[in-house]
Amino acid sequence: MKKAFFILGVCAVLSACGGSAGSKGGSDSSAAKADADTVVAKTGAEAAGGSAGSAAGEKLLAANDCGTCHKVDTKVIGPAFQDIAKKYDASEANIDMLTKKVIAGGSGNWGTMAMTAHPGLAEADAKEIVKYILSLKK
Ligand code: HEC
């Protein structure tokens, strides 16, 4: 019961659940919870970069090791994602170049520290991640 209140509270605050839950016509609690999760995830992306970006890219990013070396707004071992977004326009050429760089790894654009290669990452997935990163521009 408390949990239901919490979810309703989140929905009320964000005032974003009503529409999507209503359009699905379902009001069982698991659907409501799924909606709440989506809303929370979206809010995270918005808080981080002011744009919802690519939700798929955000998930893929979380599922890979990128967070070990990158954070959205601060440099760790690799540059902050917001700095990457500032440096590159979201043009096809840049997206392609960065997609290849994420898969191949390497250094030189930000310093001498190298990014590890990600040979197991599919090109389409890497591209989604890169699009998401470039959407984080402030
Ligand atoms: C071992 C630490 C490490 C990991 C893990 C890592 N990175 Fe990096 N990343 C770096 C470093 C260091 C750089 C700067 C490379 C340079 O100077 O060219 C970088 C640069 C980048 C760039 C900018 C490339 C450029 O040429 O400007 C992107 C985009 C990027 N990383 C995305 C990712 C993604 C996506 C993942 C997960 C799949 C990831 N990184 C995982 C360390 C890491």
Image (cartoon, rainbow, N blue to C red):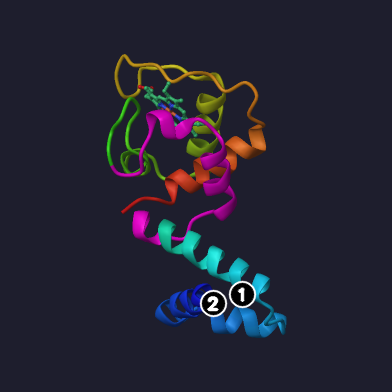
Which residues are drawn in magenta?
Answer: 46-73
Reply yes or no: does residue 49 show up in magenta. yes
Q: Amino acid at mark 2?
A: Ala
Tell me: residue 24, above or below residue 99.
below
Does mark 1's beta carbon lie closer than 8 Å to ligand 1?
Answer: no
Task: Give the mark nearer the N terminus: 1 vs 2.
Answer: 2
Quadrant where the N terminus sits is bottom right
Estimate how packed mark 1 is, as few (under 14), some (14 to 19) or many (20 or more) residues with alpha carbons within 10 Å. Answer: many
* Residue on which the image places disc 1: 32
- Which label is found at residue 4? 2
Residue 90 in view in this figure = no
Q: Is mark 2 within 8 Å of ligand 1?
A: no
Residue 64 picture quarter: top right
What's the amino acid at mark 1? Ala
Q: Quadrant of the C terminus?
A: bottom left
Residue lying at 31% horizontally and 14% vertically, measured from the top left:
112
Determine if residue 17 is in view. yes
Verify CB contact (< 8 Å) between mark 1 and mark 2: yes
Q: Quadrant of ligand 1?
A: top left
